[in-house]
Image: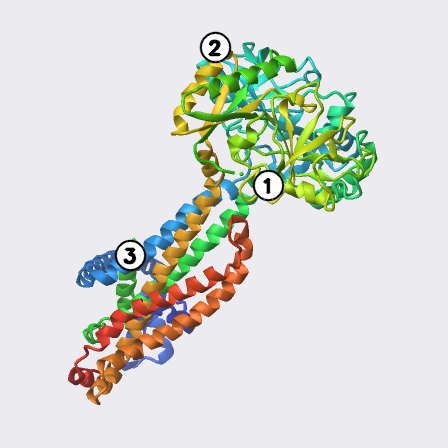
Amino acid sequence: MSQTPRWRRYLRFIRPNVAADVDDEIAFHVTMRVERNIALGLTPEAARADAVARFGDVAAVRDALVAHDARRQATEGRKEYLVDFLQDLRFGLRGLRRAPGFAAAAIITLALGIGANAAIFSVVDAVVLRPLPYAQPDGLVSIGTGAVGELIALTARLRSFAQIGAWVEQTHPVDVGQESLRVEGAAVTTNLLSLLGVAPRLGRGFLVEEGRQGKNTVLLISDGFWREHFGARPDVVGSKILVEGVPFTVVGVMPHDFHFPHATTRYWQPAAIDPANLGYNWAVWDKKIIGRLAPGVTLARAQREVRETWPTLRPLNPLWDPGPAYRQDVAPTLLQDSVIGTSGQLLWTLFGCVLLVLLIGCVNVANLLLARATTRERELAVRAALGGGRGRLVRQLITESLLLAGGFDTTQLIAARITPPERSYRDSTRVNALYDALRERVAAAPGVTSVTVSDKLPIAVPVWGMALRVRGQYEDAKHNLPTIGHFQQVTPGYFRTMRIPIVRGRGFTDADRSGQPLVAIVSQSVAKRYWPNAEALGQQIAPPWDAPWMTVVGIVPDTKQDSLRDTSRTSVYAPWAQSTLRYTAEMWVAARTTGDPSSLASTIRRIVRDLDRTIAVSSVRTMDAVVDESMRKTRFTVLLVGGFAAAALLLGAIGIYGVMSYLVGQRTQEMGIRLALGASAGGVLGLVVGRAARLAALGAALGILAALVATRWLSGLLYGVSATDPVTFVIVPIGFLAIAVLASYVPAHRATRIDPVRALKAE
């Protein structure tokens, strides 16, 4: 017969020990038989031997009894717990119906905390935690952005990467039969798909020879584009599409979940690389370079090699010397981190906010339950006196808790992107004639007061900068050149249409055309930087290559170009008709009206269609809409954080109410004694509210210290206000104190209505 260790018997406090109970029962029967045999005159040894022999095979009987009792106890235990749970559930519901205010406060508190966390975590999981849909995504590295010449040199020098490729975003007018559409795509090196580890679902990928100029008239199209414009036909491979008026052959369709580099990318074209074209290869730094780590190479090793190698390419630039700071800031990162960008930090910040909201909610519910428990001491004592064990009472309270958990003036301004096919509009004379006709016809439309055309529309798209030569200071392109933040090519009427005042000098006129002296207009920051002690008008500047000098004829204020948070104030404007730097015929037309600018959208589309139906018109929006869209992410984030802050403030108010209710419940006798001894109701009210105010003041002080630290992560979301704005740091604590006082007023007012006699009798 086995002997259960004594320490195991204490496990019965947690759950019944069937084996120990069976051992006790067997021992009881054997002991009773031994005592009877001894009474009949047997010796103790003979008595025990007879008892064991009569009992039979003790081990077999024990195993059978343990198995039988375990099954019976499990069945009965489940029934008992189910009955208890249903009873507790009914009792809890009745209790919550008797206290609807408490139930509503607790449920809303938990709903806010849990709901916000579930929503934000689903976004964090989809955007940050889920790996990219490529083969072995942890081996893909974003090396940086550079020129074609740098890509070629890095590919030959870097040994940490098995493959290196590149891509650049592009948009072209695509003729799909009924009309020309401006479609977003990407030009990629021919090895990019194999680098990413993906293959077309139909057809083939790019061939190496298709990466040469004249051989790259082939396309891969997205699954969505295939379904929308080709009806998901399986024979799409070999079909022709007019891109910029040039026939391209569809060689494959990508899988439905391939969205590189963006969800809006609809086609992929081989990037044509010509090592002999030194001007293009080193002047345009727009290629996004990525690589796949070689076997056994760590990210840290690859980062170190890139940082050591890229700056050594400085002497290879045939156009100008980029200076000693060239590529000193390169920071290769995992492709996933590069794709996520600042969104990852933003989402984790939001997730931290909602976790704090949930924490506040849990603390508040605990306070509410604690406050409610002070009114249930007598009930729980009665239940205990009637036989309710500690575990039974704890289960009742847990069941109740589970119930609770169940750039300028944007008004009257409209703009549109005009994308002519390059094949038909390579001649600058035809391009100028197109936009002159477009300006003339739009200007003649009813309600239009001014019209302009520019190569970039501020806020809507990035306005790139460039290196700059300055006459008398930085004339030689082979020496270090300064850079400006923005360079725009515009037509006459731009500053009038955008309502940017001319500070000194003049604006552009129709006389500023090809064949006439080249002119430019600069922002005030450019004038102050390069001619701080002289008049900027009449000075000369030029691009970094061997281009003619442009004479400064006007000065305008600094304006926001890339976004409302743009900090680069240096801008140079040149007449479009005198352009010496023209990559594409695509332009933006902007018109100011006297009425609703959105009514001009159909007019612009009709005018362009009448001029040439092969020209694509897209992004027709008012400038108010452009600004709103540029701030959509920031506005959404700020509103979301503000909502969390409001929820936290609400939860804080509920928490203060719960704590003060608890404290008032604990001090019932004290309040009664104070009132019995002559204390006024106002004095008792001030006592309770004063304590709440002191606690809130301490919390506000700690909150200010926490905010000074936390605002470092939120500074990128702010516009027009600093991260340590003194007004905010004064108004918010005062508002919090006011809410705390209001939240404590209800229990304080209840305390003033205590019957002194009943309070003194309370136990």
Say whether residue 373 is left or right of residue 237.
left
Query: Residue placed at 65% from the left, 29% from the top?
Result: 574
The quadrant of the image that shows the N terminus is: bottom left
Specify the amino acid type for callout 3. Ile
State whether residue 285 appears in this view: yes
Query: Residue placed at 46% from the left, 26% from the top?
Result: 449
How many residues crowd mark 3 within 10 Å: few (<14), some (14–19), many (20+)?
some
- Can you give x and y, in whole percent of width and height, for residue 98 in the image? 17, 63
Say whether residue 391 is left or right of residue 94.
right
Q: Foreground mark, 2 or 1? A: 1
Q: Which residue is mark 1?
A: 557
* Quadrant housing residue 373: bottom left
When the figure is inspected, residue 17 is found, relative to residue 233, above or below; the finding is below
Q: Earlier in the sequence, mark 2 or mark 3?
A: 3
State whether residue 17 appears in this view: no
Q: Secondary structure at mark 2?
A: loop
Q: Earlier in the sequence, mark 2 or mark 1?
A: 2
Say whether residue 137 is left or right of residue 395.
right
- Mark pair 2, 3: CA separation: 58 Å
Q: Which residue is mark 3?
A: 107
When the figure is inspected, residue 158 is found, relative to residue 736, above or below; the finding is above
Query: Residue placed at 76% from the left, 21% from the top?
Result: 277
Specify the amino acid type for callout 2. Gly
- Can you give x and y, in whole percent of width and height, for residue 673 in the image? 23, 87
When the figure is inspected, residue 674 is found, relative to residue 469, above or below; the finding is below
Q: Nearer the viewer, residue 564 or 228?
A: 564
How many residues crowd mark 1 within 10 Å: few (<14), some (14–19), many (20+)?
some
- Can you give x and y, in whole percent of width and height, for residue 608 in the image? 49, 16
